[in-house]
Amino acid sequence: MLEKTIKTSALGLATLLLSAPVFAATPGTAPATPHFDHSTASTDPEGQGEDGQNWATITGVSDDYSSVTSALTDVPYAECGIGGHQSPIAINLSGTTQTTNPGSGNMGDTNPSAVTQTSSNELRFNYVSNNSFTIFNSGHAIQVNTPTTYTGELLIGKDAYPLTQFHFHAPSEHYFINAQGKTVKYAGELHFVHQRADGKIVVVGVLLDNSGKESNQVSTTLQTILNGLPASPSAGPTANGKSAASYTLNPKNLLPADAGNVYTYAGSLSTPPCSEGVEWFVLEKPIQITDDLATIQADIANKIGDPLNARVIQNSLGRTVQILHANHHDNDHDEQDRDLR
């Protein structure tokens, strides 16, 4: 099995049961969750707002046993507003503590400069090809779901995290603050979501750049995904936004050949319910999507129905990002990156 290997810290990975609050109007019916979107307009009751926290004010629906909204369902996304470890954040490489959030302009943030982690374990992407991937229009992102039989996983030391799905954001969710204090953003961001049976979640963020040449393997993989994306969240064989056909894909084709450094911190899901306890690993080096960026953006705007689907940068609140130096492995195609240092 061909692996991509990256050296990472032996950090304790936080535990999180990925489960949104359950709401249903009638006993025995499928759970229903309130709708949300990524709009930053203050007039949008379902939008994230200017600071990415308005989702916390979205109210739920009645539970199974009462016609009155319960305390649990009243504000199901409350953690989006009251959580202290929210994602995404600006990864600070300036060498000094930053007090201004570059996403919201909040002057009250405390964002320490990232520090180098010296002790490390291998982080290995044991992603493999499979012919049963499902392409999913979630109403919030272009998403690819792995089949239940999928054996691809992320290894961190001796800990294995099965890959459950990956999805796309445009523009990027994470920003960088470089050595000159300048904010660096990317055209998009790909999230590989891993979850163990005990509920532990690790998300790997791969930046999407449009300033260089897109490789053939990236282009072929993206074209398969974009061509198979249902036209709406209500399209598909069972009207649930999932593709009727299964597709052959290898997620490893969407990893950079040279990951550069890896930046890790404790965060949250970046969409409701914004559950915390997620361990993030953001790769320094991007993949190039020059040829397919316009299609990704158009699909998010038209098929997904959101003009953008990136959450506003959240306050770091004193969290320190750790820099993990990577092995350079499987250099089978060229990638370029912006100057973060």
Image (tube, helix red, strand yellow):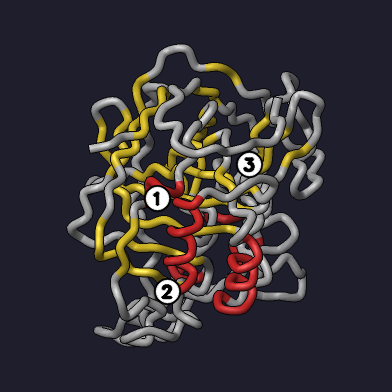
Q: Residue at x 60, y 77 (%)?
A: 305
Residue projecting furthest to the top: 118
Number of the label disc, if any, that sits on residue 331: none
70 horizontally vs 29: left or right: right
Amino acid type, label 1: Val
Label 2, on which residue? Answer: 228
> Residue 229: x and y, percent?
45, 74
Label 3 sits on a secondary structure element that is: loop
Sequence-wise, which precedes: disc 1 or disc 2? 1
Q: How many marks?
A: 3
Label 1, on which residue? Answer: 193
- Residues packed near mark 2 inside 10 Å, few (<14), some (14 to 19) or many (20 plus): some
The reply to whether residue 86 is visible in this rendering is: no
Q: Mark 1 or mark 3: which is in front?
A: 1
Disc 1 to disc 2: CB gap under 8 Å: no
In the rendered image, the quadrant that contains the C terminus is top right
Q: Quadrant of residue 157?
A: top left
Amino acid type, label 2: Gly
> Residue 8: x and y, percent?
42, 24
Label 1 sits on a secondary structure element that is: strand
Q: Residue at x 32, y 86 (%)?
A: 237
Q: Residue at x 41, y 27 (%)?
A: 329
Q: Quadrant of residue 21?
A: bottom left
Amino acid type, label 3: Ile
Label 3, on which residue? Answer: 89
- Rounded to the nearest whole Å, what is the CA distance between mark 1 and mark 3? 17 Å
Disc 3 to disc 2: CB gap under 8 Å: no
In the rendered image, the quadrant that contains the N terminus is top left
Taking depth in this image into account, of 29 and 72 the one nearest to the observer is 29
Label 2 sits on a secondary structure element that is: helix
